[in-house]
Image (cartoon, rainbow, N blue to C red):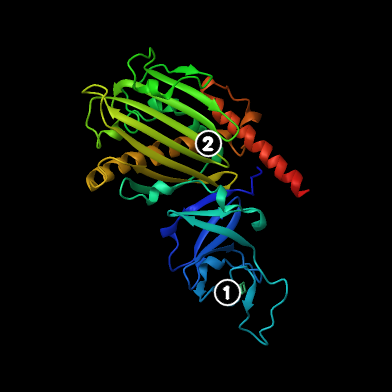
Amino acid sequence: MKFLKNSWYCAGWTNDVQDRPVHRKILGEDLVLFRNSKGTLIALGDRCPHRFAPLHQGRVHGDCIECPYHGLQFDDSGACVVNPHGTGAIPAANKTSAFQVEERHGVIWIWMGAPSKADPSAILDTSHIADTENYVTRTLSHPVKSNYWLVVDNLMDQTHAQFLHPETVFGKAAAERWAVHMDAKQQRDKAFSDDDENDQEVWFEENEESLITHYKMRGKPTPPLWKPIFNSELCNLYSRTIWRVPANCDLTIEFSARDDGFDQEVATMIGHHLITPIDDHNCTYHLALSWNAKIDDNEVTDAVMEIVRQTVIDEDGDMFEKCQAYMGDNTDLFSLRPILLETDRMAIQARRQMQKLIEAEEKAAG
Ligand code: FES
């Protein structure tokens, strides 16, 4: 499978890289991440050019990383700058690759393409993570043994939730047929209005910058995910999932308890689901989840994150791996001639858009 290289991928969280080098594999490339003497994050190819030892098993020396095998040292450009042997001469070709990295609000972003093409202004806005007055945020990272598109499929079609997550994020009492609309004329405000005839509805929105799936449930049983925060019986819920290149999905949920009528507080939960390919058959599911109700209650926070952990790891993660196992080594969904449903629309569009971007990138590279 070909990957889009000129793009920002999540490489984990700021706290993941402290005083020891850390290994990552992204788009099939083995990388080492470390901090120099000033705390600046550096990302280099992990393979030492001498005898191909893994640099992440070495140690940081000032602003360089020292290879664990014969002690060559490499600076932030990937160039070998110290040879502790003989005359200390350094062959001109003695360097490893270097990658641009940025840290934003606790997220590590890496640009896997040509450093000269990196545009930090294109990094996803996760600024509410830093807004600790109004939001509580927790993160998780989970390695998945499946192609990354199986995860994006899942995020762009949440009608699976009533079947796969009856005890966790969704609950079972709300399970019924979704009304599906193929245009975006539905108004988001309908989610909180008694004038609308549909209680459970999904609709799509497609524009030049993004692909969006909207969901609403009106007067439905409160999903277990929200029970620790609002112990209501019924709720109104609206959610919006926006796909962004390459495989990042922003999932925002607005929730109001329904028991005492409509004039309830609306709480917001924002999930940044950042899916990073490791290689063709593996990816890392990074999630930063923030919400703005009961933010000082640690018991509530722990209870919410336990439900999220079960959902992402035990339920979704397990399903991705089982689907990939039945797909075998194949990562080209269309070649397997899958049945397509109305609710697959945005996931299919996302694949097509990415295919075009990858082809354009290849053409430009000659
Ligand atoms: Fe790295 Fe020899 S393998 S210095």
As drawn, the label of residue 243 is: 2
Residue situated furthest top in the rendering: 197
The residue sitting at 51% across, 30% down in the picture is: 212
Residue 332 visible? The answer is no
Whole-angstrom CA distance, mark 2 to mark 1, is 43 Å
Out of 39 and 195, give the one closest to the viewer. Answer: 195
Number of marks in picture:
2
Residue 228 image offset from top left, x and y in percent: 24, 37
Tell which quarter ligand 1 is in. Answer: bottom right
SS for callout 1: loop
Q: In the rendered image of this protein, does residue 132 appear above or below residue 91?
A: above
Ligand 1 has an atom within 8 Å of the beta carbon of the residue at disc 2:
no
The residue positioned 48% from the left and 18% from the top of the image is 180
Q: Amino acid at mark 2?
A: Trp
* Disc nearest the viewer among 2 and 1: 2
Label 2 Cα neighbours within 10 Å, binned few <14 / some 14-19 / many ≥20: many
Image quarter of the N terminus: top right
User: Looking at the image, can residue 99 be seen?
Assistant: yes
Residue at the far bottom in the pictured view: 87
Instruction: State the image coordinates of residue 165 (x, y, percent, origin top left).
Output: 37, 30
Type of residue at label 1? Tyr
Mark 1, other Cα within 10 Å: few <14 / some 14–19 / many ≥20: some
Is the shortest distance between ligand 1 and the CB of mark 1 under 8 Å?
yes
For the point 27% across and 31% down, the residue is 265
Foreground residue, 280 or 141? Answer: 141
Of all residues shown, which one is farthest toward the right?
366
Where does residue 339 sit, x and y in percent of width and height?
A: 58, 22
Location of mark 1 (residue): 69
**Frontmost residue, 82 versus 282:** 82
**Dot 2 or dot 1, earlier in sequence:** 1
Residue 280 in the image: state x and y as whole percent: 60, 44
- Lateral position of residue 180 relative to residue 362, left or right: left
